[in-house]
């Protein structure tokens, strides 16, 4: 078997990651509070979607890691390097919210479902051990939302500057 024989598994994992995150009660509460505190500058639904996309990508990549058997630290170190670079390129006001978004996604709905997905996948892929390879998806589900929220902020700032309407891009 080859890694691309599992494309449907990756798509399923992304769907599960997205759906559980959108339904996560703690994320809903944080998103509503962020919208209230920011005066509507941060939309609750937009934040939830950005975080859910991050979790979806993270869980799908984590499943790829399980299938290929590559070491978990490689992915986590690379992801945090990206987060550090994004942190320095992002607006100071969004960084705390982005970091908190990574934490609130791993709560009552997401953790049990994603952990079961990882353990079940590792148990069924030939040559993988649920004890060694099955864990680690929660780490992906924590770091990738940080990346997606920071990436969304960087993109929004860049688009605002190009249009001449964003921060530091006033016409």
Image (cartoon, rainbow, N blue to C red):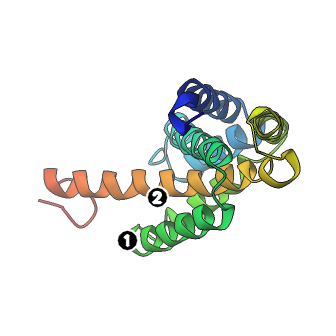
141 left or right of 157 in image: right
**Disc 1/disc 2 C-alpha distance (Å):** 9 Å
- In the image, residue 22 sits, relative to residue 171, either above or below, namely above
Residue 90, percent across and down? 41, 67
Q: Residue furthest left?
A: 171
In front here: 160 or 37?
160
Q: Residue at x 44, y 48 (%)?
A: 41
Q: Which residue is mark 2?
A: 150
In front here: 171 or 73?
73
Picture quarter containing residue 166?
A: bottom left
Q: Residues within 10 Å of mark 2 (few under 14, many from 20)?
A: many
Q: Which residue is mark 1?
A: 89
Q: Secondary structure at mark 2?
A: helix
130 left or right of 70 in image: right
Q: Residue at x 48, y 47 (%)?
A: 42
| Between discs 1 and 2, the one toward the N terminus | 1
Residue 80, percent across and down? 56, 69
Do labels 1 and 2 touch, CB within 8 Å? yes
Q: Residue furthest right?
A: 131
Q: Residue at x 71, y 56 (%)?
A: 139
Q: Residue at x 77, y 45 (%)?
A: 128
Q: Quadrant of the C terminus?
A: bottom left
- In the image, residue 92 sits, relative to residue 56, either above or below, namely below
- Number of numbered discs on residues: 2
Q: Residues within 10 Å of mark 1 (few under 14, many from 20)?
A: some
> Residue 126's mark?
none
Q: Secondary structure at mark 1?
A: helix
């Amino acid at each position: 078997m080859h890694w691309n024989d599992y494309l449907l598994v990756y798509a399923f994992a992304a769907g599960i990651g997205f759906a559980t995150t959108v339904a996560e009660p703690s994320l809903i509460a944080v998103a509503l509070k962020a919208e209230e505190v920011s005066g509507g500058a941060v939309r609750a639904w937009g934040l939830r979607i950005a975080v859910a996309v991050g979790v979806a990508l993270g869980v799908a990549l984590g499943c790829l890691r399980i299938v290929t058997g590559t070491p978990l630290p490689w992915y986590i170190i690379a992801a945090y390097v990206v987060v550090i670079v994004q942190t320095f390129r992002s607006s100071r006001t969004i960084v705390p919210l982005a970091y908190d978004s990574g934490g609130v996604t791993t709560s009552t709905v997401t953790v049990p479902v994603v952990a079961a997905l990882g353990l079940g996948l590792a148990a069924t892929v030939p040559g993988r051990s649920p004890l060694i390879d099955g864990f680690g998806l929660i780490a992906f589900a924590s770091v990738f939302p940080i990346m997606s929220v920071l990436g969304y902020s960087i993109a929004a700032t860049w688009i605002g500057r190009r249009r001449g309407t964003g921060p530091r891009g006033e016409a």
